[in-house]
Amino acid sequence: MLSRHMLRRWALPLLYLLAMMVIAFWPVPVDSSAGPELTQTLHWLHAHGAPAFVNYEFVEFSANVIFFVPLGIILGVGLRRFWTAALAGFVVSGLIELGQLLFLPNRFATLTDVVANSLGCVLGAAIWLAVSKGYWNQKASKPSN
């Protein structure tokens, strides 16, 4: 049986993974209903000086990167190695896109998504690495009595 401590420790990562699977395998693109608002927002941003590269593709790519950062952190914590976590993130991303290609005709599996998702995992694993190195360096520098 799971202890309270274990349950608390893994509740948030498990909720994230569940949400990620729901979003990844939703039958239609999750942003399909946001199209008009996103278009209006982008027009407003461009009218107020946003550069032309800030378009739908940029927003989608950036959202995918951000969305996969927590997975990189979770994989870093679980696997304890930066490159293993980064590679696992790439594999997870590839499997998600393959699943969309094979089973979800209204979804669009793209190599760009694999790149963005993998980049998010790498950033998450890098955050984990930086935080864990800082934690262990701080712990090592304290004198033990």
Image (cartoon, rainbow, N blue to C red):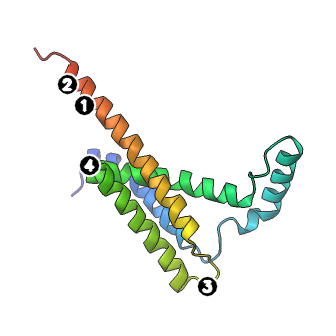
Question: In whole angstroms, how far apart are the C-alphas of marks 1 and 2?
Answer: 6 Å
N-terminal of the pair, mark 1 or mark 3, is 3
Quadrant where the N terminus sits is: bottom left
Identify the residue at image location x=72%, y=69%: 32
N-terminal of the pair, mark 3 or mark 4, is 4
Eyeballing the image, is 10 above or below 25? above
Q: Is residue 2 left or right of residue 55?
A: left
Towards the viewer: 53 or 77? 53
Residue 69 drawn at (x, y percent) = 48, 50
Element assignment for label 4: loop
Identify the residue at image location x=80%, y=44%: 50
Q: Is residue 30 left or right of residue 38?
A: left
Residue 59 drawn at (x, y percent) = 68, 55
Which residue has dot 4 on it?
80
Question: In whole angstroms, how far apart are the C-alphas of marks 1 and 4?
Answer: 13 Å
For the residue marked with disc 3, what is the amino acid? Pro
Which residue has dot 2 on it?
140
Which residue has dot 1 on it?
136
